[in-house]
Each structure stands twice: as C-alpha cells, then as structure tokens.
Amino acid sequence: MDYLRARIRALPSAVLYLVIGGATSLLALFAVVGLFVAFALCLVGVGIPVLPDAVRAVRPLLGFERARASAELGETIAEVYRPFTGSVRQRVATVFEDPANRRDITWLCLHAATGLTIAGLAVGLPLSAVNQMLIPLYWQAVPEGAVQTFGFVVNSWGTALASLAIAIPVAALALQVPAAAHWQARAARWLLAPTPDVALAHRVAELTATRAAALDAHGAELRRIERDLHDGAQARMAAVIMQLGLAEQLHDRDPAAARDLMRKAQDTATDALAELRDVLRSVYPPVLSDRGLSSAVAALAARSPIPCTVAAHTIGRWPAAVEAAAYFVVAEALTNATKHSGAANLAVTIDGTAHLLTVEISDDGVGGAHETEGGGLAGIRRRAEALDGRMSLTSPPGGPTVLRVELPSGL
C-alpha cells in the first residue's frame, strides 16, 4: 500500500515532466532537421561557416533538458563543451572532435523520436484508467453505442463490468508513468553528461584555475601585509629609535626635552603595537580561535554601522582555513553593504553540515550589485574558489541582495 500511495503521489509531477518532455521533443525534432540541413549544406560548402553557430544554437534546449533531468534525479549534470575558437576550419573541427556534440545529437534524435509518444501515453493512460472505472456509472446515461472502449461497444452490464476489469491493467500501466519519467531523466543524464575523462579534464582545469587564483590572492595578501608593516609599524619603530636616540643626547643638557621625547617614543611604540595587532587580526583574527566562528561573526555584526542580525545553525568547529574564509567573507560583505547598498537592515545566516559550511548575507538595499574585476565581490569569489567553494549573487534592481557562499569543510 505504501508503494501504491507513493506512486499515486508521484504521478502528477511525472506527467508534467513527460508533457514538458513532449514539447521539447518537438523542439528537438526541429533542431535535428535544422542540423541535418546545415550538414547537408556543408557538402556543397555553403553550410561550413554556419555549422558551429547551428550547433551552438541548439545548446539552450540541451541546457534546459539538463536542468530538468537534474531536478528529477536530484543531482547536477555538468555542461562541458570545448570552446569554439580560432579560424572557421578550427571551429568546424571542434564540432566533429568534441564528443559532447556527438552525444548531444544522439540525444536530440532519440528524444525527437520518443518524447512525444511517451508524453501522449503519460496523459492518456491515467485518463483512460479513470474512464474505464467510470463507464459502469454512466454508460446507461448516454445514447446507445456511444461508449466504445478497446474495440467493443458498452451496451450491457456485462460489457460495462468488462470495461471495469480492463481498468486494472490500464491503471497498473498508468502507475508506471513515474518510472518512465525517471528513465527519461536517466537517459538525458547518460547522453548529456560529460564522459568521465572529459569531466576529469574539466575538473583538473577548474582546479588549476582556482589554484592559480589562490596563489595570486596569497601573493596579494603577502604584499598587503608587507606594505602595512613597512608603512606602518616599521616606520613607527624607526621613529621610536630616533626619538630615544635624541632623548639620550639631550638627557644631560635638557632633561625636560629628553622626557618629552621619551613620552613621544612611548606613544609611538603604543601606536606601532596597535598597528601590529591590526595586521595580525587581518591574517587570522584571534577571536576565531578563542570563541569560534559564530561568536566572531556576531562581533562583526555588532560593529556594523547598519543593524545586522546573525542566525547561526552550526555545531562544532571547522578547519581553521574554512572558518577564516567564512569570517573574511562576512567582513567584506558587510563592508560592501555599508558602502554601496543603502540598506536599513542586514542579515547573516550561517549553516553547516559535516561536509559543507554555508554563509548567506542579505540586505534590503537598492540592489543592482554586480561583480567587477578587483572589487570586493571578486575577492570573495576568489577566496571561496581557493577552497573549492562557490559564490552566488542575487541582486535585482530595487533589492534585496543575497550573497551566498558555500565552503566544503572536508579539506
């Protein structure tokens, strides 16, 4: 009974999935015809320049099917293509050499041939099963001979009961519609997902890029620390040495002036110590190791000029690099919001599992935030990608702005 109830609950969404698949199968049919024409024109040389554009033109449909199959299966289907670059000859060669294009065309042909038929069955079988069960209730109320089902006319109670018996296998077939939707999604994953070697190469390229970005960010951070030390604490310590040297020279001749210089040297040393503490906090805030991420973010929120609430749904601790990245993401996001958002309220949400730490910062400001090279959002993205994480930004004009960062914790 549990199985039956589960299938009945899954039936509406499965029918909708397959009906949409029927619509996309018509688009796939047009795409197949268009590609066939483009390939045919290539035989006379006319279609060669437009062939890469024709292949690229069908990719939105394929991306839509990947998204549908991902939602149905509960897993992400990556989209990996070789870029069309270089001369016309090189772009045409990419069309034939990229295995993703061949798999796409295979899926288009298969979906164009089967999608509409499966969609018709997905709608027809449940309706037919319901009709078969209702025939004994209404066959007498309609003109004689008007009710025909599976090749015979219902004109007696015997044929009406026969139609009721037929409803059982029809209903059993209708309950297989969710399985058909699942298999259609699996077929899309099988053909539209990148092959293991392509996925591995893409992953290696992605990690190489994030590693290079992490090294660049690390180098920039070292240069910033060096600049802060050179222009701040180091300069102040040099001033302390000079002031103490002058005080020593004036000690016998002008004790009062010597004492003034010593007081100035003490003040300068105090400022240098404060700047050293600021530099250390920018490397790894002590509050993180002392009180944990939630308390450290709460301290940031308390210092924000815009009222900020913090909701932390976390248990335990994460690796120091992950906590530091999350802390600086929040710090940079709050700074950006203070400068540009015009918001009246900010909210920080921290959520974590054993494998993923999620930080979300939202504001009710003017919206329209976008990532620019060298800006704060670009720095947040680099910091996240350095740990193999992801950043997403939603900021329509008029707001609200939502910044979400996901950091894998299994380092």
Image (cartoon, rainbow, N blue to C red):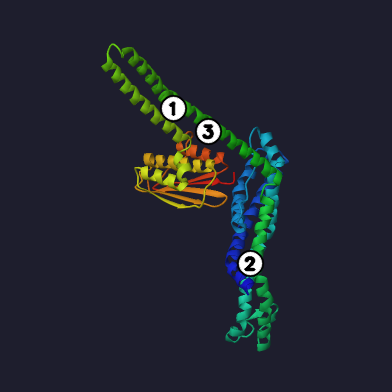
Picture layout, residue 256 above or below residue 329: above
In the rendering, which numbered label is found on residue 122? 2
Helix or strand or loop: what does disc 2 sit on?
A: helix
Which-is-in-front pick, marks 3 and 1? Answer: 1
Mark 3 or mark 1: name the one nearer the start of the chain. 3
> Looking at numbered disc 2 in the image, what kind of residue is underneath it?
Ala
Residue 374, x across and y down, in percent:
48, 33
Report helix, strand or loop for mark 3: helix
**Residue that appears at 33% across and 16% down:** 247
Task: Rate crowding at label 2 as few (under 14), some (14 to 19) or many (20 or more) other CA atoms within 10 Å.
Answer: many
Q: Amino acid at mark 3?
A: Ala
Mark 1 burial class by Cα count in 10 Å: few <14, some 14-19, many 20+: some
On residue 217, which mark appears?
3
Q: Compare marks 2 and 3 and give the one earlier in the sequence.
A: 2
Mark 2 or 1, which is nearer the eye?
1
Q: Which quadrant does the N terminus fall into?
A: bottom right
Disc 1 secondary structure class: helix
